[in-house]
Amino acid sequence: MGTQRNGFSKRETFILSVDVGTTSIRCHVYDKSAGIRGSCSAKVSLLYPQPGWVEIEPEDLWKGFLTVVKGAVQDAGLQMCQMESLGISTQRATFMTWDRNTGKPFHNFITWQDLRAAELARSWNESCTMKTVHGVMKTLHFLTRQKRFLAASLVVFTAQHASLRLVWALKNIPQLRQAVEDGSCYFGTIDTWLLYKLTKGLVHATDYSNASATAIFDSYQMCWSGFICSLLSIPLSILPRVQNTSHKFGTCDPSIFGVPIPIMSVMADQQAAMFGECCFDIGDVKITMGTGTFMDLNTGNKPHTSVAGLYPLVGWKIGADVVYLAEELFSDVRETEAIASSVEDSDGVYFVPSFSGLQAPLNDPKACASFMGLKPSTTKRHLVRAILESIAFRNKQLFEVMLRETRIPITKIRADGGVCTNNFIMQLTADLLGRKIERPSHFDMSCLGAAFVAGLGTGYWRNQEELKKLLSTDQHFLPRRSKAGWDKGCPYRGVLQSWERALQRSMHWYSQP
């Protein structure tokens, strides 16, 4: 896949795809070969009104969206009438509420990084109500052996969940409460807001991949969870209609881009990246290393019930076919490989990347980020190497959880995101996992995934097999078979064990609420 500008007919049509990420909005125009004909990007401005609060101003986001769409088409030297369809990929669990009649927001977007509901999550998790719920669900699972009851018995709320941030908004924003009482309130994640704006208020919808990431959705029943909504007093009436990932959601109002472009896919970013990587088969794994690192495993047509904290998500629903993913997220830090490679090891220094607590398999929201093992001989190069090693170590730890929990044979591993350009991290991850890892030539896989789904919906591409043939690989990272200190295929096992001890030391650091 590459950028081409010349030699195409004006009669050709193209797929327009936009990805609204955590820090930027990007738009690409794709041709039949999945080559990029034009691109444009804009920065997402994050607001920090209070410590721990992270917001996005809705109008700024909308203006940025319009700017990148128009800019990408202009960059390609094309016209809007040549855009066959539009696909949209968005960051997940970032939401807003607004007046359904006027479109006026009641507050800014509250992002997935926002921590204002942290105390609310702690209170709920320690409540008698949750203990009772867990007990009842365990009993129901014992009697019925239905996995959805096992999943419910293990539910723990976090600030990352849109559910509790919505509860916070309902409690603290008077005009929002009034709108709920009046029946004039809409709730939506970024995709829902964009659909509403693009169709001039005609569409209030989302897709299954975005809905499943809100912690308000029942991935087993494939509908909004009446139980969660009842438990948290969230009115079902404000929630959008859930549609297939490949679906004609509506058309852009002609006043916006000059022509009525069909909106043929709406998709959550990590699921879109999974689709863009063509991880269509059970056992396919995608590792996205960017603002956060996400590891996703294709578990087929059934949601995976985890006892270690892997989150079951709907990957996509196309027609009657549903694909589920098991996912885990952790935060990381970017640095250059040259500094890390300039020293043989980290000199006994270990970094714990728990900026928002530790996720699976430790699941400790009170863990702290930390360096351990600092000494007079420690240099900046050792610190950088420790940071980069921690990313690969975390990949290894999470991979082991996935293998143990799902018992699904891994068929292939593909990596994307800005951090995957770091060869040091990629090679060390391949060494630790003992598996080949493929790195694509094109890193913006969320945009590509949304484009693929939109193109399939209009017949621009015929099927998933055709998409696989369009995918290109920049480099394969093979595990090195012989190296001093390796034990049973695992590089410097003692170093990994020491890092795991550092994780344990960092846990329960923030003991006070």
Image: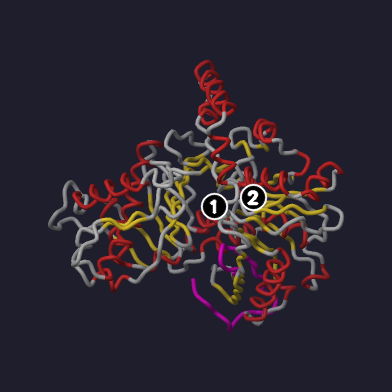
Residue 122 image point, x, y percent: 54, 39
Residue furthest front as drawn: 512
| Above-or-below relation of 14 to 455 | below
Characterize the magenta stretch by its predominant secondary structure.
loop
Task: Report whether 286 appears left or right of 71.
Answer: left
Residue beneath disc 1: 271
Residue furthest left as drawn: 484
Residue 152 image point, x, y percent: 55, 30
| Above-or-below relation of 405 to 207 | above
Structural crowding at the residue carrying mark 2, measured as other residues with C-alpha within 10 Å and reported as few (<14), some (14–19) or many (≥20): many
Q: Which mark is residue 245?
A: 2
Magenta run includes residue 203: no
Magenta run includes residue 2: yes
The answer to whether residue 265 is visible is no
Where are the magenta residues, as a range? 1-26
| Above-or-below relation of 461 to 339 | above
The answer to whether residue 239 is visible is yes
Q: Secondary structure at mark 2?
A: loop
Structural crowding at the residue carrying mark 1, measured as other residues with C-alpha within 10 Å and reported as few (<14), some (14–19) or many (≥20): many
**Type of the residue with mark 1:** Gln
Image-quadrant location for residue 239: top right
**Type of the residue with mark 2:** Thr
Q: Are marks 2 and 1 in contact (CB under 8 Å)?
A: yes
Image-quadrant location for residue 455: bottom right
Residue 396 image point, x, y percent: 32, 50
